[in-house]
Amino acid sequence: MLCRAALLPSLRSSGQFWRQTDVAGSHPCLLAPNLVLRNESARGWSNIPFITVPLSRTHGKSFAHRSELKHAKRIVVKLGSAVVTRGDECGLALGRLASIVEQVSMLQNQGREMMIVTSGAVAFGKQRLRHEILLSQSVRQALHSGQNQLKDMAIPVLEARACAAAGQSGLMALYEAMFTQYSICAAQFFSSFQILVTNLDFHDEQKRRNLNGTLHELLRMNIVPIINTNDAVVPPPEPNSDLQGVNVISVKDNDSLAARLAVEMKTDLLIVLSDVEGLFDSPPGSDDAKLIDIFYPGDQQSVTFGTKSRVGMGGMEAKVKAALWALQGGTSVVIANGTHPKISGHVITDIVEGKKVGTFFSEVKPAGPTVEQQAEMARTGGRSLAALQPEQRAEIIYHLADLLTDQREEILQANKKDLEEAEHKGRLALPLLKRLSLSTSKLNSLAIGLRQIAASSQDSVGRVLRRTRVAKDLELEQVTVPIGVLLVIFESRPDCLPQVSALAIASGNGLLLKGGKEASHSNQILHHLTQEALSMHGVKDAVQLVNTREEVEDLCRLDKLIDLIIPRGSSQLVRDIQKSARGIPVMGHSEGICHVYVDLEASVEKVTRIVRDSKCEYPAACNALETLLIHRDLLRTPIFDQIIDMLRVEQVKVHAGPKFASYLTFSPSEVKSLRTEYGDLECCIEVVDSAQDAIEHIHKYGSSHTDVIITENEKTAEFFLQHLDSACVFWNASTRFSDGYRFGLGKGARWVPCAAGAEVGISTSRIHARGPVGIEGLLTTKWLLRGENHIVSDFSEQGSMKYLHENLPIPQRNSN
């Protein structure tokens, strides 16, 4: 039956249908005479919008990278028994199954060709037979005793083949009903009048051609074929040895069936869903078991397989063998978890989108380490870095500063390549091109800043913050230690790399760097110089540059390898990272919507200088002015005219806020949103009634970054400073002072000066670090307790010891 409810009425109405023997040649099924239907015909069967996507490629070679999976046209989804079966192994997990059908339907309606290889007939039949047995026993019991004693009834052990025979028709009907909800026809090859695939269907040439032709025609008609092995009969003898070449594989379970089907149908992708996250290097749940992100042929020796699933015929070893066989035949494979409640609802679509889900099988082994290996290297290297003497870490940073000036020509030449490629592609706006550009003056500023860090960073790691005498001969210390492994993601600003590297080195942290593609040449040489500097004390691996095709969202999943993410880039980048981070803290600000409020009692001279510097000194910076708030009574006064004249001279494009526009006959273009970060020579002007009104406006539309009041009234200024809840609040000073180096905190080894800012980032969060963040924001603490045979029971009421909790002086360290 080819989804009779959807297919046969349309065929009968035209009087065109005929009978054709099925794959095995024994069961008739109804097929259309002209199965090569045009796409318009197929689309007409669905009420869901049919999305056409560019999905064409020559089959014969599997995809080399996950990012290419989005181009998969023909996809097989294999559902393991543990995926479709309930935990009690009696009945189907209907919620999971419905979610899978929804995802398959979504991909089908994008123009892909989906096929399903499913288990579940045994579980469905077991549920059905148990119900029949209970009903039969209860009737007999009632006839003999007059009472229904179900509690004492023993259910006999049900034979799997009998369960499969009883459950196949019900499973067929369930799939048909589910797919009907999405107006998609499901042709199911496992009912009493459909074909259950066995080994002979592949090894008998005629039956194999029948199967191949039928499946191709079903796919042409926008039908989702659903295939299963014949669990109701004894498997036929294996005509060939198993897994010996592309043309030979015995169909013993649904894993081998899915692999054989994928190769036979020249499928682009095989998704194998099981009850584990993917392939581990040792049995899942065992100590030190690690998920293998990418598996390559020949890696089997590095894997220890455990026992098979609680249900089903195959285990992980069978899945790996089938996957490698399919890979050899040109089909990409991903093994993933289809039972996890938090991910099963989008696991299939995530895989097709190229996200880092499960284990991806690839024939192309990268030359360098994986990002997981890089994170481990950064962890190990960071610990070695933290164990160095402060003077040694300082030497590394000094050497890196020297390399920036000594290798200036090579750096600028690499940066020139990036600029030429960016201009040729035309993808970067002018502010981003400015950020991408390096110059001799920028490199000199970087070198100076790095030397300042090196000179003053020796009092960072291991600094004693508190000492307490807990009891006699029991002393407690709180000391600073590195956070661990930092992931810093930055866009089109290669000068970030040596800045952040120096801060990580000074704080003893391992570092993963993910730069934008537009700065790849610059980042490569700067990272090479950083590792050269680290090599002088044998800690080269502490700083790693991610060069693989890892997407930012995939990096954010590495919660067991990364301790802190610091995004540096557009507000959209930061928001995406904050959304994608799973269990990893994110330190940063999503936007830099900075305000300057011009009070009624502001000085004319101060206003024009501060506003000009805040907006025009470096408009692409996150601490640049974006919204200018003006007291209502200043409109049409000389101070207002001077502000407008200055902005006109500086070629700043002005947008009018709603209140400001209402005062003007001919106003500038009205803002679309008061929450806009322009990042260029543009700003918004809005009118407020008072300092309190300005505070309320900033709280509503600002980003808690940096905000300024210009006034000569000290009382008004202090009110603004105390009541405005932003990370940085200034009085009569430019927003551009929101920078660690300009704060004058170099003595704490926290900051690096550069044209674009001095810190590892600016945080608008309320825990750990706020405002400009440097070394102190990259440190945490640990507690050291030194005792002398102390135990807690000695401090009980009957014990001999008493708590003292005396504060002790903190030793001063020599930071020359």
Image (cartoon, grey):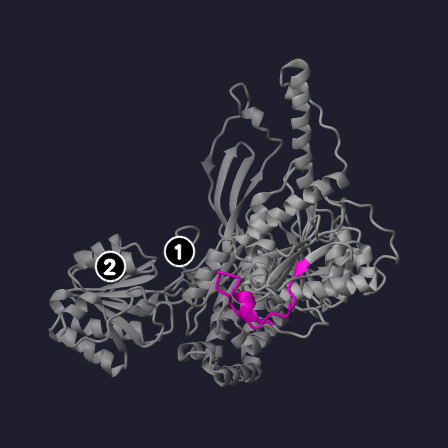
31 magenta-colored? yes
Residue 67 visible here = yes
The magenta segment: 30-55
Q: Nearer the viewer, residue 748 or 709?
A: 709
Q: Nearer the viewer, mark 2 or mark 1?
A: 2
* Residue 25 pos. (x, y %): 78, 58
Residue 750 vertical placement versus 310 (above, below): below
Dot label at residue 770: 1
Residue 173 lies, in percent from the top left, at 61, 47
Labels 2 and 1: the sequence-earlier one = 2
Residue in the picture at 38% in, 66% down: 739
Q: Quadrant of the N terminus?
A: bottom right
For marks 2 and 1, give the CA distance. 21 Å
Q: Main secondary structure of the magenta part?
A: loop
Classify mark 1: residues with Cα within 10 Å, few (<14), some (14-19) or many (20+). Answer: many
Three-letter amino acid code at the position of disc 2? His
Visible in this render: residue 311? no
Q: Residue at x 58, y 44 (%)?
A: 94
Marks 2/1 in contact by CB < 8 Å: the verdict is no
Q: Which residue is tagged 2?
A: 697
Relative placement, left or right, of 712 versus 211 is left
Residue type, mark 1 in image: Arg
The residue lying toward the viewer, choosing from 381 and 107, is 107
As for residue 64 lying within the magenta part, the answer is no
Coordinates of residue 183 in the picture (x, y in percent): 53, 57
Tell me the element at label 1.
Answer: loop
